[in-house]
Amino acid sequence: MRRILGHVEDSILIEQPFFCDYGYNISVGKNFYANFNLVILDGAKVTFGDNVFIAPNRGFHTAGHPIDPVERNKGLEYARPITVGNNVWIGASVTVLPGVTIGDNCVIGAGSVVTKDITAGSVAVGNPCRVIRKIDEQQP
């Protein structure tokens, strides 16, 4: 994995299978864990902070296509970076779309489709994913 990924800070564990476009656009911080079936389409930079834990069947997709069918049928594509902060837990079957930033200390609920930035210290769920509450240190 250290030969495939662009940057690995420290200990990582990525359960197989793992799929990516290039690998060199992926940066992983310390203490990274990803469960089975991780897909990272890294046409642009994908950055994971420290202590990121990812459940099974997730996709991080930097690639997108024009909405206009004439432009799309020309084979045009764009890529926007994805950033995941420190101490983030991403639930099973989550999809993160191009250009999204997930702030530090967030929890993203299972099945969510993250279309917009998620502010630090949030619990966010749904399709589209939205913040449902801030994380309170007193609560589990």
Image (cartoon, rainbow, N blue to C red):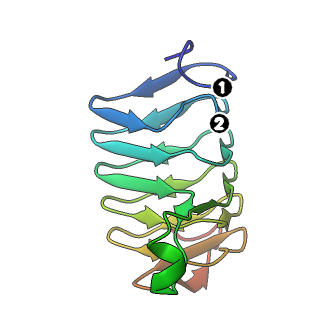
Q: Position of residue 17 (x, y in %)?
A: 27, 32
Quarter of the image where one finds residue 77: bottom right
Q: Residue placed at 67% from the left, 74% from the top?
A: 117
Look at the picture and state if 37 lies above or below 96. above
Residue where numbered disc 1 is placed: 6
Of helix, strand and loop, which one carries label 1?
loop
Of helix, strand and loop, which one carries label 2?
loop
For this view, does 91 lie left or right of residue 57? right
Residue in the foreground of this view, choosing between 131 and 134: 131
Quarter of the image where one finds residue 103: bottom right
Q: Earlier in the sequence, mark 1 or mark 2?
A: 1
Residue 46 in view: yes
Residue where numbered disc 2 is placed: 25
Look at the picture and state if 36 lies above or below 103. above
How far is mark 1 from mark 2, CA to CA? Answer: 6 Å
For this view, does 87 lie left or right of residue 1? right
For this view, does 34 lie left or right of residue 71? left
Do the residues under discs 1 and 2 have CB atoms within 8 angstroms?
yes
Q: Residue placed at 49% from the left, 83% from the top?
A: 70
Residue in the foreground of this view, choosing between 77 and 99: 77
How many neighbours does mark 1 have within 10 angstroms: few (below 14), some (14-19), or many (20 or more)?
Answer: some
Quarter of the image where one finds residue 101: bottom right
